[in-house]
Amino acid sequence: MRILFITAVSFLILGILLLMARIWGLGQSFPVYEHAFFSGPAPIVIVKADTLEKVQETLKLKPDAVIWADVRISSDKVPFILPASRDREFIDMKLAEQKANPTAKIMAGGKLSEYPWEQINEFYKTTPALKEYYEQFPETRFVLNIIDNVHDVHSTVVSAIDDLKPNPRTLIQSDALIIMTSIKELKPEWVYGTSQPDIMRLLSFDSLWILPSTQFKGDVFIAPFKLMKRPAFNDEIITEMRRRNKRIFLGPIENEAQLAEASRYKAEGLITTNLPELLRLLNQGPAQ
């Protein structure tokens, strides 16, 4: 009986603490975050494009599209654009060269970030440096999804585009919270998205019924529909983001069901890898 009593009291105290945390969270107020990045028609269409040619094709179809760029860092600190899914091609090539020339120093490591930009650009011939995006498309907005969590990534990205008028047209996104935090210390005037730890924390706190007390410092809630084969968000998380006056960017949108879900949540941003298909789903034709 004594053990049962102690257990019951412990659960009661825990419940009171959780209730207090929830009430405290619900008592917080959040101002609306305004930024030039959000100007233009809604919803914002965000297109993943990893070459200059793809960006040109995208802007021809939709001149006000935002470009999602997967940012990588070479060993000599050159930011460039390439999806992580393509790394294997380069590493396999280096491994084959090393096997063919066992005495030569060819393999620098198993990550793309361990190789210089000259070698990377020689292999991926259409891969642009990050600054080329900003130079060639001076009116375009970009979501910079920074993948490589390497030393000095924050200063490397900032210095690459700092003289190319990035302030009104740059949103920083990354799976690594530390990357966004470190860049924000240098460039608080840019817009910041949602890391994977942010999403996991929101889901965890929601399961404990204390979602309102969860810390979230992003300016925009950005999420895929699935994370590790599980839903990356739910009605409660979207409602909480709305209470905090956060804009919602969802995707990549791959079918009508996902678009319907994004529409139900009134998402301000729609992410896609296939702009013509998304325009079809939206009943929008190409720009005239």
Image (spheres, rainbow, N blue to C red):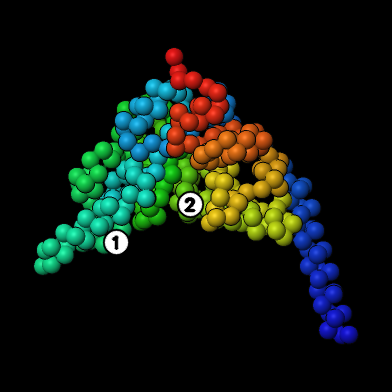
The residue lying toward the viewer, choosing from 89 and 7, is 89
Q: Quadrant of the N terminus?
A: bottom right
The residue lying toward the viewer, choosing from 192 and 228, is 228
Task: Indicate the position of residue 162 as horizontal and vertical percent values.
Answer: 37, 36
Residue 110 is labelled as: 1
Residue 151 is labelled as: none
Q: Indicate the secondary structure of the residue bearing disc 2.
A: loop
| Image-quadrant location for residue 80 | top left
Q: Is residue 49 above or below residue 180?
A: above
Task: Indicate the position of residue 40 as horizontal and vertical percent values.
Answer: 53, 23
Task: Indicate the position of residue 128 as horizontal and vertical percent values.
Answer: 29, 38
- Marks 1 and 2, Cα distance to the nearest angstrom? 20 Å
| Residue at horizontal 39 percent and vertical 22 percent from the top | 60
| Residue at horizontal 26 percent and vertical 38 percent from the top | 126
Q: Would residue 110 be found to the left or right of residue 118 on screen?
A: right
Callout 2 amino acid: Asp
Q: Which residue is mark 2?
A: 175
Q: Quadrant of the C terminus?
A: top left
| Residue at horizontal 50 percent and vertical 27 percent from the top | 279
Which one is closest to the eye, mark 1 or mark 2?
Answer: 1
Lower position in the chain sequence, tag 1 or tag 2 = 1
Q: Would residue 209 be found to the left or right of residue 200 on screen?
A: right
